[in-house]
Structure formats: C-alpha cells, structure tokens
Amino acid sequence: MTHGHLSRLAAIGLLGLVLGSFWALAIQPLGEWRQAQLTELERTKLEIERLTLATARLEAERDSLQGETTISKLWDGTQPGEISARIQSHLNDAASESGISFRSITPLPPRSAGTYTSFGFRLEFEAGLGQLARFLQDVEYAAPALPVERATLRRVIRPGDRSEQPIVFAQIDIVAPVLTNDGNL
C-alpha cells in the first residue's frame, strides 16, 4: 500500500471515529431522551383520561345529590316511636346483609340541629374488616340519610384466631335527620 492509500484509510477511519463518537455522544442520547419523553407523554395522556373520567363521575354524583330534595334525605313519620323503629329496622337489615350481629343498639337523646331534629343510635358490635366496610357502605349510602357521627374501632385479638381479616370491635354513633308528617323538623 502506498502512503496515499494509508492516508485515505486513516482519514476514512478518523471520519468513522468522529461520526461514531458523534452518534454515541449526541444522536443516541437524543433518541433515548425522545423515547423517554414519548413514554412519559403517553403515561400523562392516560392519567388525564383517568382523571377526566373520575371528574365526570364525581360531577354526576354531585348533580344527583343536588337534585334530591332536602325532604328526601330526612326520615319522616307521624310518631317518634314509629320513626325510631324504622331507623332501627334499616340498621338491622344493613347489619344482617353484612353478616353482623349487634351487641347493642342504644338510642341517644334526640337533638335539634338548626333546621331539623336528629335521632341518634349507638351501635356496638364485632366484625371482620370486610363486614364492617360493607355495613358502613350501606349506612353511608342510605336514603334517607344515616350519617356516622362518631366511630371508635379497636382490633380484637384472640389467641389462635386464624381469620383472614382482623376482627374489630366497633362503637358507632349514627344520627338520622327526622321530619314529622306535621311539618315540624
């Protein structure tokens, strides 16, 4: 080989080395950065879609709650004893559907809370977490309303208990807004 051929080969090799270095130091990292940005963009689009759906569900729930009249959220009846019995029956049904047996249901003194009267009940029972969750969901979505005013939960530990879920002792105060048929709140 002649010196000219060697020079050309060296120049081509040097050019290849420069182009390879340029590729390794500039083009390839830019390609990886671009791919990472496209992946992040797709993830962000999916998150926006998820949040849009969640927002639409919440707005629909808000609209349905605002569409209800205040009267439909109140327990009504002609006699306090009748109203109390209906509320207790509803609580017992919700407990039964959840597999819960109450230790006690204690009526709390009726209270006037501005524009309505409320009847309260203190519920005491033991249940698995799944049972408790089902019961509270039934109570939370009750119509008429049965808001939980106070709850005390304590884990019950029994030697040799092999339950899949922890057992809890629950003491829950439920209040029921009441309207009597004569229009008195």
Image (tube, rainbow, N blue to C red):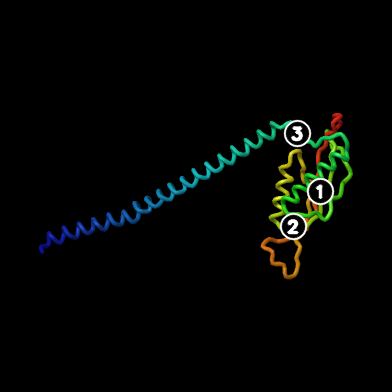
- Label 1 or label 3, whichever comes before in sequence order: 3
Asked which secondary structure carries label 1, the reply is strand
Give, as a three-letter code, the residue at label 3: Ser
Residue depicted at 72% across the width and 50% down the height: 97
Cα separation, mark 2 vs mark 1, equals: 16 Å
Front of the two marks 1 and 3: 3
Q: Is residue 139 above or below residue 164?
A: above
x%, y% of residue 17?
26, 58
Q: Is residue 108 above or below residue 72?
A: below
x%, y% of residue 51?
56, 42
Give, as a three-letter code, the residue at label 2: Ala
Give, as a three-letter code, the residue at label 1: Asp
x%, y% of residue 19?
27, 54
Q: Which residue is mark 3?
A: 72
Asked which secondary structure carries label 3, the reply is helix
In the rendered structure, find residue 173 and report the number of the disc placed on it.
Answer: 1
Quadrant where the image shows the N terminus: bottom left
- Label 3 or label 2, whichever comes before in sequence order: 3
In the rendered structure, find residue 106 and report the number of the disc placed on it.
Answer: none
Cα separation, mark 1 vs mark 3, equals: 22 Å
Q: Which residue is mark 2?
A: 127
Left or right, 17 with respect to 178, comes to left
Whether residues under marks 1 and 3 lie with C-beta atoms below 8 angstroms apart, the answer is: no
- Label 2 or label 1, whichever comes before in sequence order: 2
Q: How many marks?
A: 3
Front of the two marks 2 and 1: 2
Residue depicted at 16% across the width and 58% down the height: 8
Cα separation, mark 3 vs mark 2, equals: 31 Å
Residue depicted at 72% across the width and 46% down the height: 138
